[in-house]
């Protein structure tokens, strides 16, 4: 039996109380314990960004985070962002630019893109590429994704 | 694998040091290395898992007399945008800009990068050429004791340091730069993001009238730990930084490193990189 610990945190605006295995990562907790499967498992090593979530206002790879470390923190996942009207322009831009093919990287891409726009509303294509460097897409070749984020940034004003 | 018997998230340094005094502890800060390393079975958990993320006073950058003091829990992202780091240790900010990805920089801490003791740790080479000291705290007899050690002497092997099991790395101290101080960092990887260095180079010193003194040269990913390069330093120290001195230093650098062949590059290629990039960096210093 592995050691468990009680945690309490805010998930997409709602207080959650859970008991988790102390070695569990935040991604497994979100998908298997809470049941929010929008956040994806890609590599499990922080290389691909498919599991990106927002923790206390900053994006993190949830696969690299200990779930116990979420105690007292404020977490937003792609499901929370989907319910946020401020993210509408970004979602529409992804649709309009065809920035989605298989879609597996998309939740992580959108989480990170939203973070880029929050922290740097004037981001140009270069800043967007730098911001997205921790997110891999094996379909699009990135151009459409960068175009989508750029249009949400500058066209969405 | 040892079963974890206790999880602790202390809020004060005193409490954290007390826990370290009681037995074998795995320390969790950002978790970006601990999680994948333990999952892959390369690192085993000790009986106590201690999350130091909530310990007060271990975060942030301050001026402390003639030193820049950086708390161990300061994240790489925080270093990147810190005005004191930009002013007094810009070469550290530059290394942070080459560090992994935004998501990892938001989680990873400076103390974690140091204690992880990777020969390729991105912040280590610039910190070494800036004469950084680490500050280690412990509570052996009921009261807090601290000691300091040059970072260049802290590493003993891959993943191994001189930190005692009852100690916590609380901060690093970097002397404020003297007038004429120059520092350069170079990292070679196959892509800018999320790459582990093939080699990295740090060069620092005081440049006056075309002459370099207080010379510091360090290399990453060419030995079991990040290393200073005494022969390269000696080839430069007090000499006019002209083409002859630069070529001699680049040759000394190639001759004194002893890298290995691995998935990222052959030993030969690493030695050539060390030679060519040391030369290029010194050219830039000379022309600046």
Image (cartoon, grey):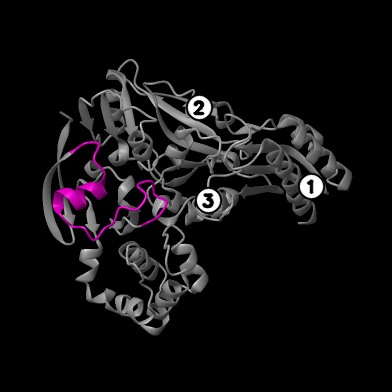
Task: Return the x and y of residue B245 as percentages of the image width and height.
Answer: 85, 42
Q: Residues within 10 Å of mark 3 (few under 14, many from 20)?
A: many
Whether callout 2 and callout 1 share a subunit is answered: yes
User: Could you tell me which chain the residue with mark 2 belongs to?
Assistant: B
Secondary element at tag 3: helix
Residue annotated with mark 3: B85
Distance from Cα at disc 1 to Cα at disc 3: 23 Å
Secondary element at tag 2: strand
Q: Quadrant of the C terminus of chain B?
A: bottom right
Task: Return the x and y of residue A117 as percentages of the image width and height.
Answer: 38, 71
> Is residue B185 highlighted in magenta?
no
Which residue appears at 34% of the width and 34% of the height? Answer: B38
Which residue appears at 75% of the width and 35% of the height? Answer: B233
Task: Return the x and y of residue B25 as percentages of the image width and height.
Answer: 31, 25
Kindly check if marks 3 and 2 are in contact, taking CB atoms under 8 A apart as contact: no
Nearer-the-camera pick, A118 or A105? A105
Residue A57 — which label?
none
Residue annotated with mark 2: B148
Q: Is residue B57 toward the left or the right of residue B4 in the image? A: right
Q: Quadrant of residue A111?
A: bottom left
Q: Quadrant of the N terminus of chain B?
A: top left
Nearer-the-camera pick, B213 or B80? B80
Would residue B114 be visible to someone looking at this image? yes
Residue annotated with mark 1: B208
Which residues are drawn in magenta? Answer: A21-49
Q: Quadrant of residue B204?
A: top right
Q: Quadrant of residue B168?
A: top left
N-term mark: 3 or 2: 3
Which residue appears at 69% of the width and 38% of the height? Answer: B217
């Amino acid at each position: 039996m592995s050691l468990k610990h009680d945690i309490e945190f805010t998930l997409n605006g709602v207080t959650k109380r859970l008991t988790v295995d102390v070695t569990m990562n935040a991604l497994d907790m979100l998908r298997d314990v809470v049941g929010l499967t929008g956040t994806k498992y890609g590599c499990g090593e922080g290389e691909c960004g498919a599991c990106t979530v927002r923790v206390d206002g900053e994006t993190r790879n949830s696969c690299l985070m200990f779930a116990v470390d979420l105690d007292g923190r404020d977490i937003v996942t792609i499901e929370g962002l989907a319910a946020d009207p401020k993210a509408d322009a970004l979602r529409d831009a992804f649709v309009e630019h065809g920035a989605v093919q298989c879609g597996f990287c998309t939740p992580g891409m959108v989480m990170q893109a939203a973070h880029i726009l929050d922290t740097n509303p004037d981001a140009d294509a270069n800043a967007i590429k730098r911001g997205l460097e921790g997110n891999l897409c094996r379909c699009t070749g990135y151009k459409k994704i960068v175009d989508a984020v750029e249009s949400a940034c500058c066209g969405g004003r | 694998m040892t079963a974890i018997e206790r999880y602790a998230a202390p809020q004060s340094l005193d409490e954290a040091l007390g826990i370290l005094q009681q037995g074998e502890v795995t320390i969790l800060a950002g978790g970006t290395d601990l999680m994948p390393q333990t999952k892959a079975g390369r690192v085993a958990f000790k009986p106590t898992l201690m999350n130091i993320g909530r310990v007060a006073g271990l975060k942030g950058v301050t001026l402390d007399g003639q030193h820049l003091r950086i708390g161990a829990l300061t994240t790489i992202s925080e270093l990147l945008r810190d005005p004191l780091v930009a002013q007094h240790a810009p070469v550290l900010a530059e290394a942070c800009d080459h560090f992994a990805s935004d998501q990892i920089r938001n989680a990873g801490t400076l103390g974690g990068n140091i204690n992880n003791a990777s020969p390729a740790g991105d912040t280590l080479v610039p910190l070494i050429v800036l004469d950084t000291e680490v500050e280690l705290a412990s509570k052996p007899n009921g009261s807090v004791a601290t000691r300091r050690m040059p970072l260049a002497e802290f590493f003993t092997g891959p993943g191994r340091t001189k930190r005692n099991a009852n100690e916590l790395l609380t901060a690093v101290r970097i002397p404020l730069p003297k007038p004429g101080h120059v520092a350069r960092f170079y990292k070679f990887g196959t892509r800018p993001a999320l790459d582990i260095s093939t080699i990295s180079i740090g060069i620092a010193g005081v440049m006056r009238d075309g002459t370099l003194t207080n010379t510091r040269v360090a290399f990453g990913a060419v030995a079991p730990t990040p290393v200073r390069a005494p022969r390269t330093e000696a080839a430069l120290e007090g000499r006019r930084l002209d083409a002859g001195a630069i070529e001699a230093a680049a040759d000394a650098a190639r001759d004194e490193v002893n890298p290995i062949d691995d998935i990222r590059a052959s030993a030969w290629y690493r030695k050539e990189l060390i030679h060519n990039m040391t030369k290029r960096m010194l050219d830039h210093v000379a022309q600046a």
